[in-house]
Amino acid sequence: MQKLISKYGLAAHLGIITAAPLVLFPLCSAAAIGVAMLYLALVGTIWVIMEPSRIGREMPHNARERVIRTIVRDPLFYALLLLAGFAAVRALNQGVGMSYDLELQSWAFRDAPSPFLPGSVKGAAFLPFCVSVAMVPVVMGVRHALGKAARCAFAVTVAVVAGTGGIVFALMALNGSREILKLAECAYNDPYFAGPAFGIALLLGFSGMFAANEKHWLRVEFLLVPGLIGTAAGLVMFAPALDVLVFAGTLLVLVIAGFALQHKAFEGAGSFRAAVSAITVLVVVGFVVVLSPAGGGVSRRVQEVQMWQLFPEAFFQVRAALSGIALKVFANNPWLGSGLGSFPVDIRFLASAAEHKLIFHGQTAALQGWWQLVAERGVIGSVLLSLVWGMIGWTYVSRLIGAFSAENSRFELRAVNLIFPVVSLALAAITFFECSLYRCEVMLLAVAALALSASSAPSRKKSAKES
């Protein structure tokens, strides 16, 4: 047991950090989730440094020295620290909103206390700051402190934890929970959906299932299959029909490619179990959809797909109007944006009378996620997010090129190596119509999944086998 904890404990803890916001968001306040994330991140940071996976016959102190040395030399580490620092300033510089001018007897836009620093609406930036802090141990741990088997355990843990939350939420919805049914409505006036995070966890879970079958971890399936069912149910419940179709398509690509790439590594029984697991997930989620309350969010989205009405009436006119408003906001605040969570206020001041009649009631964000990014975060905030994504992408591309070009390399593509392109394409597609990418649960899971995929190909200089 001690050996298992030593080898897989860190992977399990990093998986819990990654999935924690997703399983807590309907049950806890943003402040409570943020505090929990800070504690988990602190423990994770200590664990990454003190008990990383050992390579070959490494002693514990050699493993610690290796991990610390590689982290300090990793440019992504400093990019993540810079992102966390930016988020910290934004969380402290809160106060963007509306104020009443007694002299003019009218409402006016109120800037942050320090207008030359990144700002936010009160209470809107604390959880993003906590998640940006948690990204540091998660990404650095996946990149430098986990071996091949531990990375598989990380993917399985994320799917199991997220799937447990999905099953609980599905049962609550079937029991008529108003809170869950309200979250399942997925209206485009508040286009930040948690479903894509479940979709990413589902993709991670299937890649973990392929890896577990290849390693002959037979008992893992008793945990993993319910986890896959839960993540699929969470995707169906908390994402609009378009997002469900996008992730269903990427999942189909991943599953077919996974069987094609890894069938030689499976025994006959392993391949059969993987197929049965995939079919079981589809069947059980189908029952969840059929048994969902009539008139609820899930049943309504089924009707939308059947009638091929994926968007509400006048959606594209509203989208164009909101994109124009976001462009005006960006023109007024090009470097730092108007502040996190400020777009609903921007709509009130910048929309014309005709646009006010057209825009959905209670609109909180643009329906073009790329414009939403630059409107609230500006060039600097957008560059920081893109920098993290780009650095992980550089690792992914360079490692794949190095793996296939290296002499005597026996590297073969696996399902986990496909996570980077399928997740990136899925998120890029849905961001043309909504803003789920900037939701904390989605961002943390996306960055963790990309880091896992990028680190799963061997570096140019091959290391010894993991102990």
Image (cartoon, helix red, strand yellow):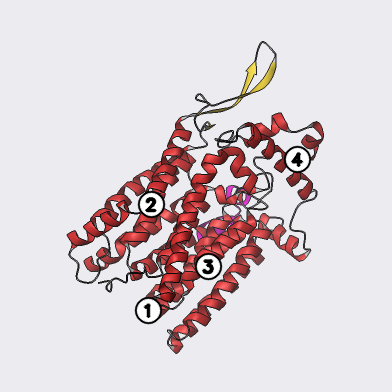
Q: Is residue 251 magenta?
A: no
View extreme (top): residue: 103
Q: Which mark is nearer the camera, 4 or 2?
A: 2
* Mark closest to the chain's N terminus, 2 or 3: 2
For disc 4, the marked residue is 359
**In the image, what residue occupies the spot 66% across and 66% down?**
290
Q: Position of residue 96 (x, y in %)?
A: 56, 28
Q: Say whether residue 251 is left or right of residue 81.
A: right
Distance between the alpha carbons at the discs numbered 4 and 2: 43 Å
Q: Amino acid at mark 2?
A: Pro
Residue 230 in sight from this viewpoint: no
* Mark closest to the chain's N terminus, 3 or 1: 3
Count neighbours of disc 3 (C-alpha within 10 A) and say few if under 14, some if 14 to 19, many if 20 or more: many
For disc 3, the marked residue is 229
* Mark closest to the chain's N terminus, 4 or 1: 4
* Mark closest to the chain's N terminus, 2 or 1: 2
Count neighbours of disc 1 (C-alpha within 10 A) and say few if under 14, some if 14 to 19, many if 20 or more: few
The boundaries of the magenta stretch are: 167-182
Distance between the alpha carbons at the discs numbered 2 and 3: 37 Å
Q: Which mark is nearer the camera, 4 or 1?
A: 1
The answer to which of 274 and 83 lies nearer the viewer is: 83
**In the image, what residue occupies the spot 45% across and 89% down?**
268
Q: Which mark is nearer the camera, 2 or 3?
A: 2
For disc 2, the marked residue is 75
